[in-house]
Amino acid sequence: MHKLRSYGKVYNIGHAAVVELFDDEVTVEEKIDGSQFSFGVDAVGELACRSKGAVIDVDAPPKLFAGAVETARSL
């Protein structure tokens, strides 16, 4: 399974750190207000989940993320 990375620093368009931002393909994502939850599924269907600071065990998620993991499983 590929590793999900946490989000890095977000710079405004025009900032020197992102001057070459549109020189390649860009993926746009939106964070829904609240706890950060990220998930992905690899080519063989394995689900991976994480919060801002930690990888989430999908078989024993913390209570705070249990609903999010179940939703990710159902998609």
Image (tube, rainbow, N blue to C red):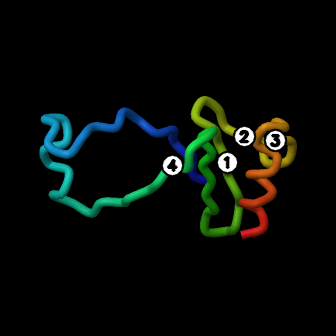
**11 to the left or right of 53:** left
> Could you tell me which residue is drawn at 63 percent across and 45 percent down?
37
For mark 2, give the secondary structure: strand
> Could you tell me which residue is drawn at 34 percent across and 38 percent down?
10
Query: Which amino acid lies under the numbered mark 3 shown in the image of this protein?
Result: Pro
- Residue 9 position, x and y percent, is 36, 33
Q: Quadrant of the N terminus?
A: bottom right
**11 to the left or right of 69:** left
Label ID, residue 56: 2
Considering only order in the chain, which callout, 2 or 3, is on the residue closer to the N terminus? 2
Is the Cβ of the residue at disc 1 closer than 8 Å to that at disc 2?
yes
Query: Which amino acid lies under the numbered mark 1 shown in the image of this protein?
Result: Cys
User: Vertical placement of 53 versus 29: above or below?
Assistant: above
Label ID, residue 31: 4
Foreground residue among 10 and 55: 10
The nearer-to-camera label among 4 and 1 is: 4
- Residue 7 position, x and y percent, is 46, 39
Label ID, residue 61: 3
Is the Cβ of the residue at disc 1 closer than 8 Å to that at disc 3?
yes
Label ID, residue 49: 1
How many marks are shown on the rendered structure? Answer: 4
Dot 4 alpha-carbon crowd within 10 angstroms: few under 14, some 14 to 19, many 20 or more = few
State the separation of the CA atoms marked 3 and 2.
Answer: 6 Å
Considering only order in the chain, which callout, 4 or 3, is on the residue closer to the N terminus? 4
Is the Cβ of the residue at disc 3 closer than 8 Å to that at disc 2?
yes
State the separation of the CA atoms marked 4 and 1.
Answer: 15 Å
Considering only order in the chain, which callout, 2 or 4, is on the residue closer to the N terminus? 4
